[in-house]
Amino acid sequence: MNATTVSPVADLISDDDIAAFHRDGALVVRGLFTPAEIEKIERGIERNLADPGPMFKVASQPDDPGRFVEDFCNWNRIEEFADVAFTSRAADVAAAIMRSDVRLYHDHMLVKEPGTRQETPWHQDQPYYNVDGFNNCSMWAPVDPVAAESRLEFVAGSHRGGWLMPRTFMDNQAKWFPEGSLRELPAIETDRESFDIVGWSMQPGDAVFFHMLTLHHAYGVPGTNRRRAFSLRFLGDDMVHAPRNWRTSPQFVGLEDQIPAGAPMEHALFPMLRTVS
């Protein structure tokens, strides 16, 4: 598939919405995906669960009454994921938000089964990655209704506050940057009233777009409903390769031999989705 020029998205987001994204670092877009696209994403997720990729992992404890699993970088083997990345309006919204050409960084499948108590702790995404720059956004879309207690929550404006220490989700270890080299995350859950926290209940077809430095988290999934979601990570025109001396998430083995440090992510693994004419 080849990149296409950006299609208008005025029926989905306004200039005020774009300004809100840049102010808050997060924006909900209602009705982004058609019913056929929702079914396509759901098929892709179920294919992914039945045939996990090499980066598949269980992100919950063995004694969790539910199960949290995720997988990365499957667009080039699961056609439904590729179709959504290349042909849906997600990349058009990303282009409007970033005012930039749009390159795919990676896809991310996340499933919390009914009764999962494992939380996704507060974190930023970009410190786990092998890219530098500021013009970026991620899209997260559920194929199941997401109630308030299971929604993604964001600290508004936190993407403008710099990088914070990334830690492993299950045992809180600093495996990406040396201890003390970055500021620690604030204790948000013990003092929620001191933070401007935003989040939205969602229906299939809705999507959240957020900056890779926006602090975000999610609780578990109580009750009998699944929470299956699909995410696309988009790179804008200032994003460059930043090889790390540690395992990034996801990891691109050998990429440092193919893209120099500080160079654009011009590689078949990161196809251009939209070009601004």
Image (cartoon, rainbow, N blue to C red):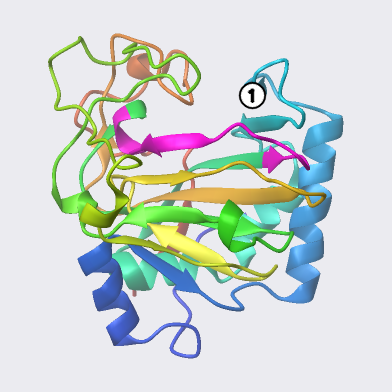
Which picture quadrant has residue 66?
A: top right
Which of 171/178 is in front?
171
| Residues shaded magenta | 111-127
Residue 143 within the magenta-colored segment of the rendering: no
Which picture quadrant has residue 8?
A: bottom left
Badge 1 element: loop
Q: Position of residue 128 (x, y in %)?
A: 36, 27
Q: Can residue 75 be seen in this view?
A: no
What residue sits 57% from the left and 62% below the top? Answer: 148
Q: Where is residue 99 in the image (x, y as percent from the top left)?
A: 28, 69
Relative to residue 205, is residue 23 drawn left or right?
A: left
The C terminus appears in which quarter of the rendering?
bottom left
Residue 123 within the magenta-colored segment of the rendering: yes
What residue sits 46% from the left and 14% below the top? Answer: 171
Relative to residue 40, is residue 210 drawn left or right?
A: left
In this view, 217 is above or below 42: above
Q: Position of residue 216 (x, y in %)?
A: 39, 47
Residue type, numbered disc 1:
Ser
Residue on which disc 1 sits:
60
Mark 1 Cα-neighbour bin, 10 Å: few <14, some 14–19, many ≥20: many
In this view, 151 is above or below 93: above
The N terminus appears in which quarter of the rendering?
bottom right
Which picture quadrant has residue 146?
A: bottom right
What residue sits 41% from the left and 13% below the top? Answer: 247
Q: Can residue 169 be seen in this view?
A: yes
Relative to residue 20, is residue 95 drawn left or right?
A: right
